[in-house]
Image: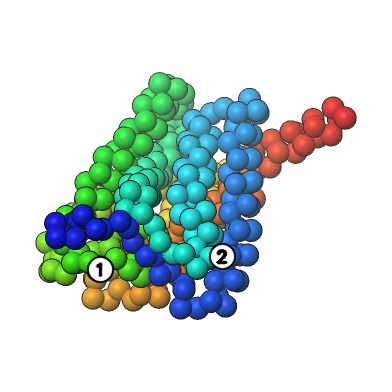
Amino acid sequence: MDPKNGSSFTGFILLGFSDRPQLERVLFVVLLIFYLLTLLGNTSIIALSRLDPHLQTPMYFFLSHLSFLDLCYMTSTVPQLLVHLRGADKSISFTVCVAQLFVYLGLGGTECILLGVMAFDHYAAICMPLHYTVIMHPRLCALLASASWFIGFVNSSLQMVLPFLVPLCGRNKIEHFFCEVTPLLKLACVDTTVNESELFVSVIILLIPVALITFSYGQIVKAVLRIKSASGQRKAFGTCGSHFTVVSLFYGTGIYIYLQPSNNYSRDQGKFISLFYTIVTPKVNPFIYTLRNKDVTGAMRKVLCRGYDSR
């Protein structure tokens, strides 16, 4: 931060979609609906994994963590965006901006690690079924989930300081709808090549789970192809299909945002991809898992029928 401006600096202006007032009205309605559906879908998965004994397994333990992550992930940006879409005041205080960036990066990093852990869980279930309950012991599951949260927020602490170490020279208008590293670095009045390089190294650390996911699914494919029963192959691929779809959506958009050269970063393109990354993906995750998973849909029917019968 520029010391010359530190005493008078109070916050930022999030320009977001302010240059398109008609789009703001449409986005408000769409995002509100998406947010409410996300709350409903992810809360339902968390509740089902607690209420149904058949879903109290390592797979659904990690899935409930993923659902809670998605709830927090979307809540870190959407409520503030909805307020800005409905009002003329687009300001955000420096403290809130720092907190938002820390939480957003921490949750994103945690999800990266957790998706890798879930891939390992599928690998153990399909490739080592006889030893699965020994390998995926509840204590190990709790340790892996805790480690995912810890590593995610440690990495967030390293990343979030980068945009606040450069002088801004009084510039405070962010071409985005929330506080994100790349738009914040663009406010700097000095060369940020070194900062971007450090950011790149930090992001590369989060690509380690990609190696774990690639290895796990490589072994899973080999194991499934050795199954002689066609129904057995479909069941095995169906178990992993939902997770692989979520991984593709999350990493595909995330890698595109953070690993593209800064000179190729389009203002509008970055905003709309981030909108998809932070809002659409958490929304579709519960539907991917419920629509493609007979255990979840079965548990949902049981709970609904139990509630209906109790009347």
Tell me the number on the disc at residue 86.
2
- Which residue is drawn at the image coordinates 46% and 73% (left, top)? 18
Type of amino acid under label 1: Arg
**Residue 309's image quarter?**
top right
- Mark 2, secondary structure of its residue: helix
Residue 110 showing in the rendered view:
yes
Q: Quadrant of the C terminus?
A: top right
Q: Would you name the residue on which mark 1 appears?
A: 171
Image: 226 above or below 268: above
- Residue 62 vs 53, above or below: the answer is below
Closer to the N terminus: mark 1 or mark 2?
A: 2
Q: Between residue 171 and residue 98, name the one nearer to us.
A: 171
Image coordinates for residue 151, horizontal then vertical, percent = 29, 38
- SS state under label 1: loop
Q: Position of residue 293 (x, y in %)?
A: 62, 45
**Classed neighbour count for the residue bearing mark 1: other residues with Cα under 10 Å, few (<14), some (14–19), many (≥20):** some
Q: Tell me which residue sits at (57%, 27%) in the image.
A: 56
Q: Residue furthest front?
A: 8
Q: Is residue 112 or residue 55 the one in the foreground?
A: 112
Q: Considering the image in quadrants, where does the N terminus appear?
A: bottom left
* Residue 149 left/right relative to 307: left
Q: Tell me where residue 14 appears, x and y as whole percent.
A: 39, 65
Seen at 30% across and 73% down, the residue is: 265
Left or right of 48? Residue 128 is left
Residue flagged by tag 2: what amino acid is it? Answer: Arg
Q: Nearer the viewer, residue 170 or 82?
A: 170
Q: Residue at x 40, y 74 (%)?
A: 269
- Disc 1 to disc 2, C-alpha distance: 24 Å
Whether residue 211 is visible: no
Residue 197 position, x and y percent, is: 15, 60
